[in-house]
Amino acid sequence: THCADIQSLPEREDLYSLSVYCNQNHPQGKDQRDKLISLSETSGAALYGDYIIREKRNWVDLFYDFDAVRWEGSGTSGDVALMTISHLLTMLPSITPRHFSIASSPSYMVRQTAALESKEGFDLELCVAVVEGKTPFGRSYTGFCSTYLSSIIPRGNDGNGPFVGPDIVRLWIHPGSFSKLPLDISKDETISHRCFNTPVMCIGAGTGIAPLRSLLMEREARRLAKVGNASFANTNGHNDSCISNNQQDEKDNILVFGSRKKSMDFYYESNWDELINNQSLRLVPAFSQDQKHKLYVQRALREADGGSGALIVHHILERNGAVYIAGGSKMARAVREEIVEALGSVLEGGEGDAKKLLNKLKRKGMFSIEAWS
């Protein structure tokens, strides 16, 4: 079955199709029909952009503004609504799937589940920003899917036993962009503070933290599997073989995370504190609005370890580390350019060699970007 998306923005051809249903017995029926036709024409592209795109007018808004479409008049002959539900459903688009990155690691969550035997299936977590804002003319708008997700009552457990909420979200899982995450445990016992053969650097901003959290928590689950449940229960003891008391030791995982304000947008802070206490994570934060100058992830990445991209060069060239980037396309592009510039400054062939190296790492699954507009 398909659900009609009445909150979507109508296309230009939709406006032309809708003009046919303007009731001419309506006082403004002819004018509204002509306006819909005008909006649908190529010559009216600018008007369409102003009216529909910039002001985010959906089908509901359209029916309100062009009420001749739904006008029934007095109900006498000729004064009935021309559009029926059947006609409407043939015009409305289906609700398109929304794609979200999984923000959790089932392997890690299973270790935290006390009553695993009584639990069916596994949990998945998402990090979704509820879309809301105002258009240039002050019209309020909200995101269709994000608003729905924020309002549902999920199935779960309230401490007194399982409960079933009225809402069910149907979903399916696709392979992500980071399917080749290095998970091989190191067999070199001389490196007391390293658990993995390959260190990982995750770079993200905002809700781009979602897939990066899943990667880091999956690696943490593997680390805990190596050291055993004892250290999992005592995360502040630092007793396992993967932990060093030297805070300057290189960590298995590096997270470069950016958001606007630490007090408002520091997603999963408690998780990062736990991994930092375990000395399995180094955090490089970039909160853009917490100081006078704007600090974005690409700048934080460049200035870390003395600046000039030293952290990038050391991680990729000296430690043979993997790099994963997630977030907005503009941020991802800026971070990639920063990495290319940093590597190009030390490689003999400059930025050309840097791009070749990143392409090589990409083929091996050690450099990947998951970005969206």
Image: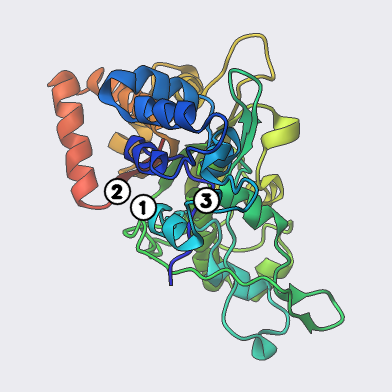
**Near-viewer residue (349 or 160):** 160
Q: Name the residue at 68% across, 72% down.
A: 112
Which coloring applies here?
rainbow
Q: Name the residue under label 1.
A: 198
Q: How crowded is mark 2: few (under 14 residues within 10 Å), some or many (20 or more)?
A: many
Instruction: Give the residue type at disc 3.
Output: Ile
Q: For the residues carrying marks 3 and 2, which lies nearer the camera in this image?
A: 3
Q: Which amino acid does label 2 sit on?
A: Met
Residue drawn 39% across the image and 16% down it: 308
Residue 206 seen in render = no
For this view, does 216 lie left or right of residue 49? right
Residue 317 lies in quadrant: top left
Residue beneath disc 2: 366
Q: How crowded is mark 3: few (under 14 residues within 10 Å), some or many (20 or more)?
A: some
> Mark 1 or mark 2: which comes first in sequence?
1
Q: How far apart are marks 3 and 1 (CA)?
A: 48 Å
Question: What SS does tag 2 mark?
Answer: loop
Q: Which of marks 3 and 1 is nearer the N terminus?
A: 3
Would residue 40 be found to the left or right of residue 262 on screen?
left
> In the figure, 140 relative to 150: above or below?
above
Q: Which mark is residue 6?
A: 3
Indicate which label's residue lies in the foreground, 3 or 1: 3
- Foreground residue among 250 and 173: 173
Is the residue under label 2 in contact with that under label 3 (CB below 8 Å)? Answer: no
**Circle 1 sits in a helix, a strand or a loop, which is it?**
loop
The amino acid pointed to by label 1 is Thr
Work out how far the residue at label 1 is from the one at label 2, CA to CA, in angstroms: 9 Å
The image shows residue 109, relative to residue 23, as above or below, that is below
